[in-house]
Amino acid sequence: MKTKFVVSMAGLLLLAAVPVLAHHSFAAEYDSTKPVTLKGVVTKFDWVNPHSRLFIDVKDENGNVTPWELETGNPTALQRRGWKRDTLKPGDAVIITGFAAKDGSHLAAASTVSTGDGKRLFAGSPNDGSPTQQQ
């Protein structure tokens, strides 16, 4: 009986830790000394928790396309800032400012998204410690 209780408690503690481990601060993954500005075309926008994800294709001066993944805030925070699930659609032209990942991959934390119709929306996570939150 005592063994079952200990195993059950260990399992509950492990399950409780999973959401905490899944979330991270800005500084854990992104570099505040590496600002990026990306001009590209939306390929996908995932309106999901804990952070929505935006995928864009960025074309360089030689015509080579590089896919980028951008982390944005969670859907609730984005919605409070005027976003909707369909704010960005595949094919939309965007300009994104943010900060590159520490590992040098084509991953960044988005700060702002400017759309083709001139709309500029804040895209970061509230209170994540990013430079845009420290102003």
Image: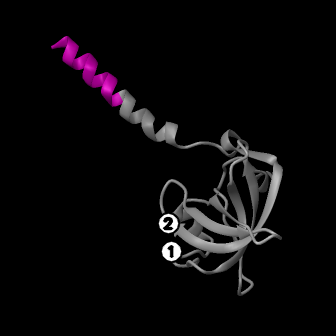
Q: Which residue is mark 1?
A: 85
Residue 77 vertical placement versus 83 (above, below): above
Q: CA distance from mark 1 to mark 2?
A: 6 Å
Q: Quadrant of residue 44?
A: bottom right
Residue 129 vertical placement versus 95 (above, below): above
Q: Residue furthest left?
A: 1
Q: Residue furthest top?
A: 2
Q: Badge 1 local density, few (<14 within 10 Å), some, or many (20+)?
A: some
Q: In the image, what residue occupies the spot 70% across and 76% down?
A: 94
Residue 135 seen in the current view: no
* In this picture, residue 45 sits left or right of residue 110: left
Q: Which residues are magenta?
A: 1-12
* In this picture, residue 20 sits left or right of residue 9: right
Q: Which residue is mark 2?
A: 47
Q: Badge 2 local density, few (<14 within 10 Å), some, or many (20+)?
A: some
CB contact under 8 Å: marks 1 and 2: yes
Amino acid carrying mark 1 in the image: Arg
The quarter of the rendered structure image containing the N terminus is top left
